[in-house]
Image: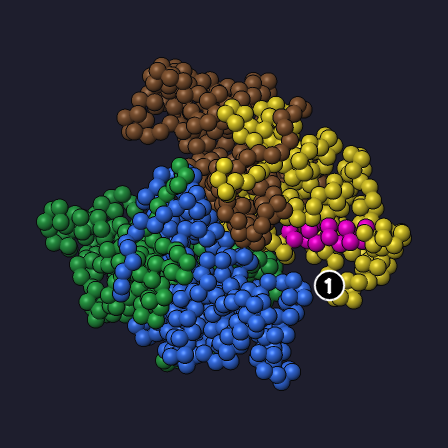
Chain colours: A yellow, B brown, C blue, D green
Amino acid sequence: MSDLHWNTAITKIEPNKILVRGYPISELLGKVSYPQMVYLLFKGELPNENIGKMIDAILVSSVDHGTTPPSALSAITVASTGAALNASVAAGILAISQFHGGAIEECMRILIKAMDYKKTNDCTSAEAAGQIITDYRNAKKRLSGFGHRLHTDDPRTKKLFSLADELNIAGEYVALARDFEVILEKSLGKKLPINVDGAIAALLCEMEFDPTFANAFFIIARVPGLVAHIYEENTRYKPMRKIHPTDVSYDGPQERKL
Amino acid sequence: MSDLHWNTAITKIEPNKILVRGYPISELLGKVSYPQMVYLLFKGELPNENIGKMIDAILVSSVDHGTTPPSALSAITVASTGAALNASVAAGILAISQFHGGAIEECMRILIKAMDYKKTNDCTSAEAAGQIITDYRNAKKRLSGFGHRLHTDDPRTKKLFSLADELNIAGEYVALARDFEVILEKSLGKKLPINVDGAIAALLCEMEFDPTFANAFFIIARVPGLVAHIYEENTRYKPMRKIHPTDVSYDGPQERKL
Amino acid sequence: MSDLHWNTAITKIEPNKILVRGYPISELLGKVSYPQMVYLLFKGELPNENIGKMIDAILVSSVDHGTTPPSALSAITVASTGAALNASVAAGILAISQFHGGAIEECMRILIKAMDYKKTNDCTSAEAAGQIITDYRNAKKRLSGFGHRLHTDDPRTKKLFSLADELNIAGEYVALARDFEVILEKSLGKKLPINVDGAIAALLCEMEFDPTFANAFFIIARVPGLVAHIYEENTRYKPMRKIHPTDVSYDGPQERKL
Amino acid sequence: MSDLHWNTAITKIEPNKILVRGYPISELLGKVSYPQMVYLLFKGELPNENIGKMIDAILVSSVDHGTTPPSALSAITVASTGAALNASVAAGILAISQFHGGAIEECMRILIKAMDYKKTNDCTSAEAAGQIITDYRNAKKRLSGFGHRLHTDDPRTKKLFSLADELNIAGEYVALARDFEVILEKSLGKKLPINVDGAIAALLCEMEFDPTFANAFFIIARVPGLVAHIYEENTRYKPMRKIHPTDVSYDGPQERKL
């Protein structure tokens, strides 16, 4: 051991053996899903299958949002210069930052703050939500996780919450998020519904993830989408074309049922 | 429409509706897994459940390999300077390149070349493998996907192939890869077994992925591992420490069973 | 003009004419130096030659610091995987962050805060320095720009300040930085000299740069160093070697005079 | 020394002493320019002042090209998401790749190939140029460094070459590039003039740089431009705006003289 010796608690590598958090990867293969592995890597323990299904659904919900998000645009802009796939993906990920994807982490911090307030002050979650909403209004800060420019009634939100009910994951944080929605409508006089970022935030809180992982879930979810856009750029368009951020039509398969 | 108008066939975004390759994301949620979504995004069609399980296992097999791969080292080196999580992940992905992860794509191209040779020359896959091995030896090029510095008998390979049998995915490419192994042993006088990259390459060929997606599968698989290392760096170590690439011990949970 | 029309005040491109901040680049060529161009791009006006020389010296002072900074290590780690030069440089730049290079911006903000305090309270710069030092001590925050782990008497600092005197650039901010040094020694009982980051911070304040440009100067200065390390890695070492962060010797030319 | 011991020939770091290629940085400060340092770092020796001036002019010539190049667009797209300055710069650099900036390296390789042909076959440089042009036409490959979509008579090219004459740097490679221009016009029946990439390529050949440094010169030149665009984005526009790639006007200072 040198004076730079250090330790890691994630993965042990030996000849012909790879232990992730103590479990041999070869035994996990086929029994544990990739979304469960994300949990194992982030939290150190294997989750039950329901949590695996919840994380799977969270990843599916954010897997792509077309060509207009800045992550897609920076990825295809870089791809269009002849850069390697990994460099194009990296450029996309550099755009998953405060204002793009960052709402999940901010909303988690808001919900955790409200839950702390509720417990400290022994009040209802509606009262806690009201207090935080007032604080944010006074500080002129935006409440991340509520309202959406385009999706006023995001079907992903409803579906994620109904899955969370089925999987016995919805609990006090989902209830709290719903209280926020109610109080926001009362105080604003108009509906500002929980958006998909807010729904994911509430669910990550239910599963007790540290908010610093929020961005990681969004990145993991979105990489396949970025790759699909990069591949389309490379196979369908000439290098160095001018990429319009909004004047783009969809010419893929028409709406179809499962 | 401006003169920069363009089309995308991946995802259609409308108010309250997101169609990925024609399927409403809200209907996919809870019914289709993230690994199936990867297939849908890359190939345009939904795969059956078996293919979803195969992709899931491929992702699980490559989810982490400890702290020594260059992607982990560049990610934690950047994390250690106080960079944001997404920037640290991007630095890790920039290292997933020709010599790190690149073997999957190279092995896919080798297998496809051998399969073309077999079909063109109407010979056995063993003969095709022998021809390609000779060509590579004459050109003094390394055959990616066979042999490993550390894992001489990688349990991930066996498990991936047995899963592929169970899921009815193993076919002519898996057989071809096994022929390569046999011919290599005969011609070298020592065993150079299919490694995990070679196994993944054969399976991606069975599922008819374009080889340019090989790197994408490795990136998707590895992002959760990179995030775990970045989180450990940020929560366990001081900024700007000197990160030794090999003098590191594992102090996580001891080997345990599922 | 579309509804996305926007404006830029930096560079006008016409056939056979490129105007940077109004000046035709072809007329600047040979008359105006690259360091003067940096000023022109950042501030919108051409600086006099003395300012050009000062920026030139700032860039030279930070052009490289060997193989141990995280930016060099992440760049060569990525280079070692066979990545392209630009991807390796990008990985290096991702490490030029809060704890590596970030001291310049932090020190600029400290000096500006002290200068504001001085002007608001009509006191001496020594009194202002004393107040800020007390505030930082009470808040248990580190004063960036003073002291260095390795260089207790950094010859670059002295040289930059003597050049600033010659070029008539040293003024109230350099004086203020020196007052900080004196007060720090008095209050700590030991010397905590201005380091090269602190010197650059004082000089950028003298030239009235917005502190958000501090990181840019460090990045510009360091890119040639990163490139030299990447080139050495690619031409001297095998791919995927294990890169020790400190067990490295210098085997270049011995010390020599200009 | 550990078994990972390695050597670097670039910079020696000792307490209070930093030697770049053997020269103490504190002695270089104020005497040697940043462009000369680039040469010292890349080639190991200090160049004379003329070479310093030539590199300075090359850097100035490529310092910015407005908002339309993909490097500017990916940098401001990432900046617009609230990413840090260094992450935005990195995203810009990831776009400086094969089709954007890559022409310099390709043109250097063409000129070196023609020069080798000339020396091997003891022919005129016009004959060598003719042979390479024929080879490229037969292989249906584009000759990088000649012709430009927008600048049919790039004033930067003329100015760089006249400076190269003044500085005694123009030699056989500049003559060769001019022969290419003449032969191209004869064989195509229309002018395809040397563009700025071709001019820089010829000059880097004159200074005997390895072609792998070509991209580095472009990156170093362009970083200040990227920073100016990032700063403008952050100070002038709202986060997450839709960035049109061409519908942009210049509203900076009108054309002015030095």
At mark 1, the secondary structure is loop
Residue C230 on the magenta segment: no
Farthest residue to the front: give it.
C189
Rendered residue at 24%/65% (across/down): D48
Residue that numbered label 1 is attached to: A141
Q: Quadrant of residue C233?
A: top left
In the displayed structure image, the side of residue B93 where residue D158 appears, left or right: left
Q: Residues within 10 Å of mark 1 (few under 14, many from 20)?
A: few
In the displayed structure image, the side of residue A190 where residue C236 appears, left or right: left
Q: Callout 1, which amino acid?
A: Lys
From the image, give the main secondary structure of the stretch colored magenta. helix
Residue D70: give x, y in percent of width and height: 46, 57
Residue C32 visible in the picture: yes
Front residue of this view, candidates A92 and B117: A92
Rendered residue at 43%/28% (across/down): B149
**Magenta stretch, residue numbers:** A101-115
Residue C28: give x, y in percent of width and height: 34, 74
Q: Is residue D106 above or below residue C203?
A: above
Q: Quadrant of the C terminus of chain C?
A: bottom left
Farthest residue to the bottom: give it.
C122
Q: Quadrant of the N terminus of chain C?
A: bottom right
Q: Quadrant of residue B58?
A: top right
Residue A213: give x, y in percent of width and height: 66, 46
Q: Is residue B68 above or below residue B6?
A: above
Front residue of this view, candidates B104 and C136: C136
Chain letter behind tag 1: A
In the displayed structure image, the side of residue D17 where residue A89 appears, left or right: right
